[in-house]
Image: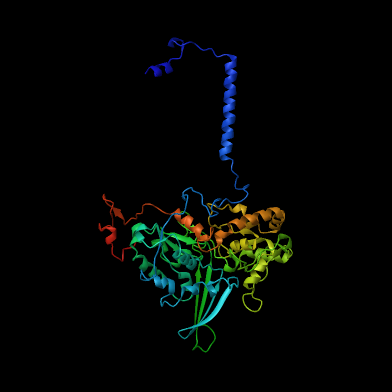
Amino acid sequence: MGSVSRGRNLGSGSGLPTVLCGRSHKIGAIVLVVATFLVTRALDRLSCDFPSPSSAASPALFDRSSGYLSWPERSYGSRLDLKIYVYEEQEIDGLRELMRGRDGRIPPDACLKGQWGTQLAKSGWLEFLSTVSGSRWWLGAQVELCIEEVKIHQLLLKSRFRTLNKEEADLFFVPSYVKCVRMMGGLSDKEINKTYVKILSQMPHFRYSGGRDHIFVFPSGAGAHLFRSWATFLNRSIILTPEVLFLVLFICISNRDKKDEKCFSLICSFVFNGDRTDKRDVTAFNTWKDIIIPGNVDDGMTKLHGPNVVQPIPLSKRNYLANFLGRAQGKVGRLQLVELAKQYPDKLESPELHLTGPNKLGRTEYFNHLRNAKFCLAPRGESSWTLRFYESFFVECVPVIISDQVELPFQNVIDYTQISIKWPSTRISTQLFEYLESIPDEVIETMIARGRQVRCLWVYTSEAEPCSAMIGIMWELQRKVRRFHQSAETFWLHNGSVVNRDLVEFHRWRTPVPLP
């Protein structure tokens, strides 16, 4: 009490001697204030003066001690520590059909080779002939296709993050190859929808969380729209998608017994992108719950050890300022680039892509063209996503995105201004050439070097590699892990037991469980 009293009575009546404040005291006080300000500011600069994104020398993605990919700790954790349960195709009735077709005749390897592999990825349209039940099937498809649904599943089966115990799992992976199976005639759209509903009803853990801890891969631009009822059943689930790709499937069925050569049945199925472009009123992609994954680049160009199909060439030996390798598809931006290439053939290369015949552009020829320019133009086509963006990093040209609505993977850790250029689609003109020509080779080399550091994130390979698309996906998945799960049909009691609406404990739930 005495000390408090003294602290409150410092005037002349307090019994303490009066201290006069002279000029020297005032000067000292001012000096102290100024010194305090300068020291505080200096300390503030020391703690906050990190390179800005525009001035950073390179993306700091790797741990200096281990050399392994490192994600920022903010909401991710300091290390990868998650457990994923992968459903087996035999344990859920119907899952095998989503992976192998109604008759189980489509092996997984078929979805990694041929029309689903990358050797023909740049031919534009695949055409093949097969005989099915006395009918002749002629199928052509745009083949900027990715095969992540198979690769991700196969890599997860070997992953150190896989668990065989559902009770300790943080997340659940539901494998399906519906894009491949559908294209190969293994299931119809109606069958896909019915089969998905059937398998979900056999997953008590899906019911438990409302699907919030279940992962689905939809690698084509059709996205989750391949499952027509996605909005009802997968609106809370985690969807992995390369964001945008438009797929046009043309099937012509011709009966052998018909005398004329015309098809008696013509089916045109247009599968529009299922994400954030203007092709659908309802998007299947949600920024807050879903994850954008890289497109699948030709395996021959993504070898981390050993030579690739083609090697980059020095900037000084490249013949063009920029290139555009793709079909016009009747799209305004692409047509403008083709026209510019005709007007300025010494600056912009845009060769005509032959889809068939002896002049058809093969894989090696395609990448030889791509590497022969300083800048690789990646305009939107039927959708905002293009594989050329990812391919450019492996031939070491700077990608120029001309797609206003594009979304890119791993934006929490990659500053894309360091490794690419995004140009307005409304300004495709000689102004683009003038801008690109103004960039010094030294700056281009720096951007290429930075891209060289992060391109490993586009490679689907083993977790034994310190950097890969799978490691990046795992970090993003870890951010989705919740300690607690519940849904509108999940309830809990005072003793911690989880029950359904009929007060039946979770471990006693019987399949099929009711779905919303």
- The residue at the point 57 percent across, 13 percent down is 22
Can you give x and y, in whole percent of width and height, for residue 31 in the image? 60, 23
Quick check: 205 above or below 108? above
Q: Which of 302 and 63 is in front in this view?
A: 63
Image quarter where the N terminus lies is top left
For the rendered model, the colour scheme is rainbow
- In the picture as drawn, the residue positioned furthest to the front comes out as 65
Can you give x and y, in whole percent of width and height, for residue 34 in the image? 59, 26
> Does residue 439 appear anywhere in the picture?
no
Quick check: 461 above or below 21? below
Q: Nearer the viewer, residue 124 or 88?
A: 88
> Where, by quadrant of the figure, is residue 5 drawn?
top left
Q: How many labels does the image show?
A: 0
Is 498 on the left-hand or right-hand side of 368? left
Quick check: 1 above or below 498? above
Is 339 on the left-hand or right-hand side of 492? right
Is 332 on the left-hand or right-hand side of 203? right
Can you give x and y, in whole percent of width and height, for residue 249 in the image? 52, 73
Q: Nearer the viewer, residue 129 or 362?
A: 362
Can you give x and y, in whole percent of width and height, for residue 151 in the image? 49, 67
Image quarter where the C terminus lies is bottom left
- In the picture as drawn, the residue positioned furthest to the left comes out as 503
- The residue at the point 53 percent across, 81 percent down is 129
> Does residue 478 appear anywhere in the picture?
yes
